[in-house]
């Protein structure tokens, strides 16, 4: 008779412990609070009220657009911009509950929200993501001084969750932010562009050569951060960059 090994016993024990915890403390969705691990996917109409789906978006920058605007060549937000990334997609507008989710996600206690938001982003835009056929998923990095103050990088949590859904490789250390810059929210749109000049660099250029990359962040406003990071990746040899964010903020 063959007895289970130590690793198998540990897995069985872990499953039983989790079952017991779930019985005493039923797991709740991090987005809607329901007693189910739905991560926004099975919340039904409730999640539509919390995080309304975007009806129409710009095909280039992911910003919400009106019902009659042809945005195949860009919208009023991005038509004059020379983006280095091909397309961008967002879960929703940076307002209301979604804004609160992201503000909490940025806090040390809010890391648990990242997976639910990433899953909802994926399921609402599944066709977009599958069409990309991304080879590698990379988060927009924080400067090392910012990492000292935070227990996590929100973009990394979102990117890792998307990598599981897309079955694509993830790397959180290829792209680095080498220059400490003032917060983008404190600058004018013009200063945002120059603020990030040469801020990013690729540590291992050989690992991005000829790859289609999905660049991930939590919020996009003017697209300057995503553009600067995309430029660095393309200069290192990547073939195409697309961007995914949780929220699209209005231009200031």
Image (cartoon, grey):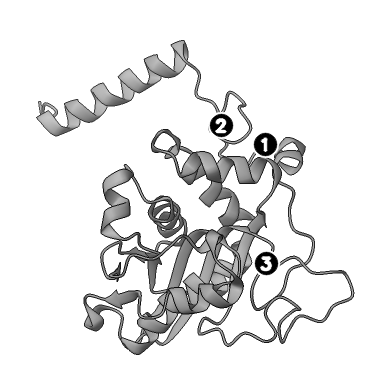
Q: Which residue is mark 1?
A: 43
**42 left or right of 134 in image:** right
- Disc 2 designates what residue? 29
Which one is closest to the eye, mark 2 or mark 3? 3
Position of 170 with respect to 1 (left or right) is right
Q: Quadrant of residue 80?
A: bottom right
Residue situated in front as seen by the camera: 119 or 65: 65
Q: Looking at the picture, how far across and down is residue 241, in whole percent?
A: 47, 79
Res 139 → quadrant: bottom left
Q: What is the spatial separation of the Cα atoms under label 2 and label 3, in whole angstroms?
A: 31 Å
Circle 2 residues within 10 Å: few <14, some 14–19, many ≥20: some
Are the residues flagged by discs 2 and 3 in contact, CB closer than 8 Å? no
Do tag 2 and tag 1 residues touch (Cβ < 8 Å)?
Answer: yes
**Where's residue 115, x and y in %?**
47, 45
At 50% from the left and 24% from the top, the residue drawn is 27
CA distance separating discs 2 and 1: 9 Å
Give residue 43's quadrant in the image. Answer: top right
Q: Nearest to the eye among marks 3 and 1: give it.
A: 3
Nearer-N-terminus badge (3/1): 1
x and y, in percent, of residue 205 in the image: 25, 82
**Badge 1, how many Cα within 10 Å: few under 14, some, many 20+?**
some
Label 3 sits on a secondary structure element that is loop
Q: What residue is shown with label 3? A: 251
Instruction: Identify the residue shown where x is 25% and y is 78%.
Output: 207
Mark positioned earlier in the residue sequence (2 or 1): 2
Name, please, the residue furthest toward the top.
Answer: 24
Picture residue at 54% right of the left edge, 26% below the top = 28
Q: Is residue 80 visible?
A: yes
Question: Distance from label 3 to label 1 (Cα)?
Answer: 30 Å
């Amino acid at each position: 008779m063959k007895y289970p090994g130590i690793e198998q016993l540990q897995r069985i024990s872990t499953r039983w412990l989790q079952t017991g915890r779930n019985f005493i403390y039923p797991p709740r969705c991090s987005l809607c609070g329901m007693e189910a691990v739905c991560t926004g996917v099975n919340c039904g109409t409730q999640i539509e009220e919390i995080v309304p789906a975007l009806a129409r978006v710009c095909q280039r920058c992911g910003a919400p657009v009106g019902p009659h605007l042809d945005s195949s060549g860009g919208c009023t937000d991005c038509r004059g911009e020379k983006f280095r990334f091909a397309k961008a997609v967002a879960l929703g507008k940076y307002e209301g509950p979604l804004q609160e989710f992201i503000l909490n996600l940025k806090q040390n206690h809010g890391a648990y929200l990242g997976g639910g938001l990433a899953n909802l982003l994926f399921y609402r835009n599944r066709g977009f993501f599958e069409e990309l056929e991304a080879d590698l998923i990379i988060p927009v990095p924080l400067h090392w001084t910012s990492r000292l103050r935070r227990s996590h990088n929100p973009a990394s949590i979102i990117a890792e969750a998307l990598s599981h859904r897309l079955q694509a490789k993830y790397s959180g250390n290829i792209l680095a932010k080498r220059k400490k810059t003032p917060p983008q929210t404190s600058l004018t749109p013009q200063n945002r562009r120059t603020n990030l000049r040469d801020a990013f660099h690729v540590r291992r250029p050989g690992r991005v050569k000829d790859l289609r990359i999905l660049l991930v962040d939590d919020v996009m406003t003017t697209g300057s951060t995503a553009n600067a990071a995309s430029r660095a990746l393309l200069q290192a040899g990547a073939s195409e960059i697309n961007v995914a964010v949780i929220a699209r903020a209005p231009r200031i």
